[in-house]
Image: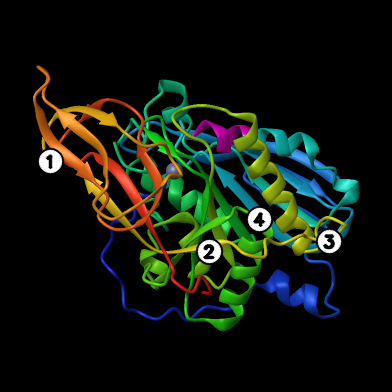
Amino acid sequence: MITRRFVIALALAAVAWPAAARAQAGAAPDAHQSLTVGTATAHRGEKATGVIHVPAGSDPALDIPVVVVNGAKPGPVLALVAGLHGTEYASIIALEQLIGRLDPARLSGSVIVVPLVNVPSFEQIVPHVNPYDHKSMNGSYPGKADGTQTDRASYAMTKEVVDQCDYLIDLHGGDIDENLRPYSYLVTTGRADVDRVSREMVLAFGIDHIILADDWPKDPAASRYLHNTALTRGKPSIAVEAGHSGTVEPDDVALLVRGCEQVMRYLHILPGTARSIAHPVWIEKVLTVSGEQPGIFYPLVARGTYVASGMRVGYVTDFVGRTLQEVRAPAAGVVMFIRAVPSVWKGASLLDLGVVKEDSQP
Ligand SMILES: [Zn+2]
């Protein structure tokens, strides 16, 4: 999932609408007769595979796999990214499926698919962070060329993927220790044109619980998160989450695959009409309850449960069975995720509670 801990940046973004979108709107020549991302170059009507090479620095080099699907007809460029957290498996497998489903002959526009950014996390089964530098790979954007591997990978993703796309979807899910119900993020920027399209993208994606936020960093030089890096560069973008506790459930994978294809219909990259969700549950804030000390967590509710304020949703004991902490809902709302494993340390996330927006109209 995406852990939101940051200092609010107040600088206003002064960014240009992407050249590709301008070309699409007018009669400008086809900007993407060929599209190159990393070592993958696809001409119109082709699908190409390659890697985004992150050079070695103070720690090893990294090759991030990438697929470029360049549609037979011109249109916008959509980037689909998963595996910033390499053990959020359902989101990674969803993009693996989508690679096989994308037929360039049917596309008007292009899709850049990056199914697994954090390859070391995936290979070593290390949740949340890159094992080389212990940084979240969704926390250092836009990155830098001379930092640790996460910084350098973020820099390469910004240059190769964010800068070349018009729209972006960042796919996540519950990590190994997160029993998570599916939800999306709609982050508003204050730019009406960008916010309108992001909103239509999240409705087209179709997950029925949507977290609203307007306080993410506005400075393109300190965007922190991948999809916020696109937003601060004027590119409508969303983040979505499905999957839980290290599983690859068909329902979660299908939700993500279908959602990406719905957004592709909304953007007219795929033929057909997007059927947007009409009445989502809008979540106006998320309250986190954390572990107060090391111990063993016992959940008492399932993900997705609607709970009353003060309801007991779990408890923590020491290693000889004495209760250390009662975990109660800090407000009325929905359990967005609850801890999926017994291990607890001071500061470990036990519960994310979503508070539903009263009128449910953003
Ligand atoms: Zn994640």
* Circle number at residue 128: none
Indicate which label's residue lies in the foreground, 2 or 3: 3
Lower position in the chain sequence, tag 3 or tag 4: 4
Residue at label 1?
A: 292
Q: Which residue is mark 2?
A: 230
Q: Cα distance, mark 2 to mark 3?
A: 25 Å
Please, what secondary structure does the residue beneath circle 1 have? Answer: loop
- In the image, residue 240 sits, relative to residue 196, either above or below, namely above
Q: Residue at x 61, y 61 (%)?
A: 202
Residue 350 falls in which quadrant of the image? top left
Q: What percent of the width, then of the height, locates residue 269?
A: 80, 58
What distance separates the C-alpha of mark 1 from that of mark 2? Answer: 36 Å
> Would you say the residues marked 1 and 4 are in contact, meaning their CB atoms lie under 8 Å apart?
no
Q: How many marks?
A: 4
Say whether disc 3 or disc 1 marks the residue closer to the N-terminus: 3
> In the image, 211: left or right of 113?
left
Pointer 4 local density, CA inside 10 Å: few below 14, some 14–19, many at least 20: many
The residue beneath circle 4 is: 205
Q: Amino acid at mark 1?
A: Glu
Q: Which quarter of the image is occupied by the N terminus?
A: top left
| Badge 4 residue CB within 8 Å of ligand 1 | no
N-terminal-most mark, 1 or 2: 2
Which residue is label 3 attached to?
273
Q: Earlier in the sequence, mark 4 or mark 2?
A: 4
Relative image position of residue 38 (x, y in whole percent) = 62, 45
